[in-house]
Amino acid sequence: MMVAEALALSAVLFAIGVIGVLTRRNAIVIFMCVELMLNAVNLSFVALSRLYGATGQVFVVFVMTVAAAEAAVGLAIIISIFRHRQTVDLQNINILKG
Amino acid sequence: MSDFFYRVHFYLFGLLAIASAITFITRKGPVAAALWLVNTMFCLAAIYVMMDAHFIGAIQVLVYAGAIMVVFLFVLMLLNLGHPDEISDIRGKWGRIAAAFIGLAVLAQVMALARSQAPEELLVPAATAAAELRDLNAVGSIAKPMFTEHLLAFELTSVLLLVAIVGAVVLGKRRATA
């Protein structure tokens, strides 16, 4: 059934997403890395749903909904930051630093 | 023979997904990175279909690779960030080394967790997905638990989406007086 292999693939993709979040400076690319991590989690849900019934796939639908909402709001925030600062580079955005 | 065929394709799409993900986080241009991420999502959709989650595979292509990534590309084009001519947006040497360490630590942790056996009381009595897929079809096996056990969560996600749409409009709107 390849469940163990799918879980390993999910772990690898999640780790790649973490590395991406930590190495990139562009806020939009960091958002896309978060999407990659959500995808990795979805893969593990689907893999485990082969063992424990279809509830895992229901959770995947919920994760996708939340990801869509997060993308809409997050990108709107990035656009309004870009209007103020003319950049999406996280090195130059320090208004929350205090 | 059929099992061998299945296995080959599983590894093919898995390796393709990993390769696309690595290319995605190493591209300098954000637009190229976004397109590699779309490739990863298509590979994951193929794997979902191979794991008998046909409906999830379909909405992976429609919602993730279609709708969400189009929004990302639209914002990239809107802000005109397609030119990687200034400084690279990948962090310096020490940032990369630290990120590699933390990434490997997360990977090791998740792998160790996957190898360990969960406590017996946490495990759901094993109802195999194949039997469920036979009784109901691909959509029904998801729709039935979603509209019976998880109805409240389903309704809450609709409210969440509405709030997100209104919030995005309010945040994205140009101030009339500014």
Image: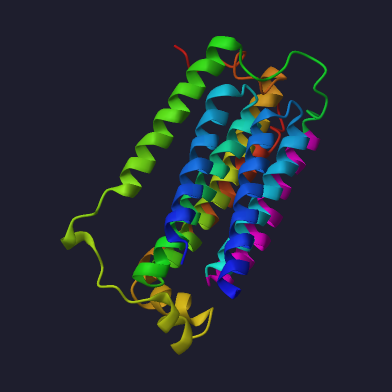
From the viewer's side, name the closer residue of B131 and B159: B131
* Quarter residue B148 falls in: bottom left
Colour scheme of this structure image? rainbow
Q: Quadrant of the C terminus of chain A?
A: top left
* Quarter residue B168 falls in: top right
Say above or below: B158 vs A20.
Answer: below
Residue B151 image offset from top left, x and y in percent: 38, 71
Q: Is residue B55 magenta?
A: yes
**Residue at 71% from the left image edge and 28% from the top image edge:** B177
Residue A71 in view (yes/no): yes
Q: Is residue A57 magenta?
A: no
* Quarter residue B150 falls in: bottom left
Relative horizontal placement of residue B32, taking residue B11 as reference (left or right) = right
From the viewer's side, name the closer residue of B68 and B106: B106
Residue B155 in view (yes/no): no
Q: Please give the range of residues in magenta.
A: B52-78
Say above or below: B3 vs B11.
Answer: below
Say above or below: B106 vs B111.
Answer: above
Q: Residue furthest front?
A: B1
**Residue at 64% from the left image edge and 52% from the top image edge:** B41
User: So how many labels did they put on this image?
Assistant: 0
Residue A57 image offset from top left, x and y in percent: 46, 66
Relative horizontal placement of residue B108, taking residue B17 as reference (left or right) = left
Relative horizontal placement of residue B30, taking residue A50 as reference (left or right) = right
**Residue at 29% from the left image edge and 73% from the top image edge:** B126
